[in-house]
Image (cartoon, rainbow, N blue to C red):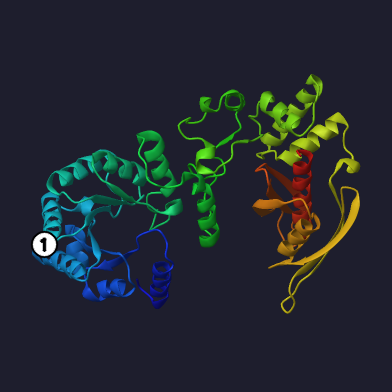
Amino acid sequence: MSSEGEKASVRKIVDAGLNLKVCGLARVIKSDIDTCLDCGVDMVHTFVSTSDVQRISTIKKSRDEVYSMAIDAVEYIKDHGAKCMFSAMDATRTDTDYLINIYKGVESAHCDIINVPDTVGVIVPSAMYKLIGEIAKNVKIPIDVHCHNDFGLAVANSLAAVEAGASQVQVTINGLGERAGNADLAETVMGLHALYGAKTNINTKYIVETSHLVERLTEVRMPPTMPIVGDNAFAHESGIHTHGVLVRSDTFEPGVMTPEMVGHKRRIVLGKHAGKHAVKQSLEFAGLHPDDEQLNEIMKRIKDIGDKGKRVTDADLYSIAESIMGNISKSEQAIVLKEVSVMTGNIITPTATVKAIVNGQERLGAHIGVGPVDAALNTVTSILGEYKFKLRDFRIEAISGGSDALAEVLIGVEDEKGRIVSARATNEDIVMASVEALVAAINQLMRKR
């Protein structure tokens, strides 16, 4: 804990009465350890560099001095009634005999658990398996591992460690951490559950929701291809893949891990590789039933859009289908936008007013927001009244340059039944583009009711 703010946060966690054990991290220095103890943590995780490269260059201590520092720190923590975890920092670059000797020493000092960190992420799974196996032969207390992802091996190394005898793995949500990050919680937990049949007491149904929460709070965006939690983790575009998944999901998914297990949704994405079967099912789901000739023309339009490097949203698909089938009609739209006005500035709260026809009834609403776009979207949502929707995705991209650039907005919306659609709108006015995209998305969801 490096600041008063961190100490205050730890105290709040300790005092919250949560069903967990709070562990504080401290160097093998009494003042660091005291800070953790003063916060009332259940366990102190103390560490010291043991590899020659770190020991000589950073703390400038001999091997014997480091050994003594480790023993003294463990004894100090235990004398104060807290549980203790000891970490030999840069363990995977430490001489193995010395590493095992220091772990045996802290075990004799009544350490509760040892941690084996791959501090710079340079070990490979086979070597991790061998190292943990050697340590397990010499030390009887539980073994914990802490793997960094510099070569993309953090999860693989963590699983190899468990296979070799480690009973605990340190992970982070979304793999956040120094440099390239640490072992990701979702990947590690689901690897253990689905591939090894191991249990972790993690409620996996909240994995995706928690990932999105951390993404919003940290403002670190996850790539769509992020395993398990990414937008594309259970998305299928290729015609062969989508046809197989629609017939039987485990043809082109792991099977031992389903989207429902982690709180995700399976999506059929339409693009240049989309198959006719998937397109037809998506249209039928929205109540559209094209004949073979119409379906072929719809497929041609979709592939033309895909050739331009774009994916087809649900709203795009329905718009294409309706234009080909001759079904375009404002009377069929649940929401018809009439007027939008926004007030904003540095001395007033951004406020939007929206007039729209909702299922044939004219409605007028006003709402505030953290900015003009937020205010406008809040207003549209508020005038829907009994219809409840949740914004799942919001992206803005300038299509052309300059302050008068065209703005393309893509919005994803989810209803109370968990159905998700996305829609795109383009306008020189970013507020109007946002509102038009939201209205288009909601209209598609309303059609599915």
Name, please, the residue furthest toward the top: 292
Question: Is disc 1 placed on a helix, strand or loop?
Answer: helix
Residue 68: quadrant of the picture: bottom left
Asked if 301 appears above or below 17 in the picture, the reply is above
The answer to whether one can see residue 164 in this image is yes
Residue 187 x, y percent position in the rendering: 42, 43
The quarter of the picture where the C terminus appears is: top right
Residue 273: quadrant of the picture: top right
Name, please, the residue furthest toward the bottom: 347
Q: Is residue 222 left or right of residue 286?
A: left
Residue 429 x, y percent position in the rendering: 78, 59
Q: Is residue 396 left or right of residue 75?
A: right
The quarter of the picture where the N terminus appears is: bottom left
Residue 131 x, y percent position in the rendering: 20, 44
Q: Nearer the viewer, residue 304 or 195?
A: 195
The answer to whether one can see residue 340 in this image is no
Asked if 160 appears above or below 348 in the picture, the reply is above
Q: Amino acid at mark 1?
A: Arg
Label 1: few (<14), some (14–19) or many (≥20) C-alpha neighbours in 10 Å: some
Q: Residue at x 49, y 42 (%)?
A: 228
Q: Name the residue beneath numbered marker 1.
A: 63
Q: Residue at x 41, y 49 (%)?
A: 184
Q: Residue at x 70, y 28 (%)?
A: 281
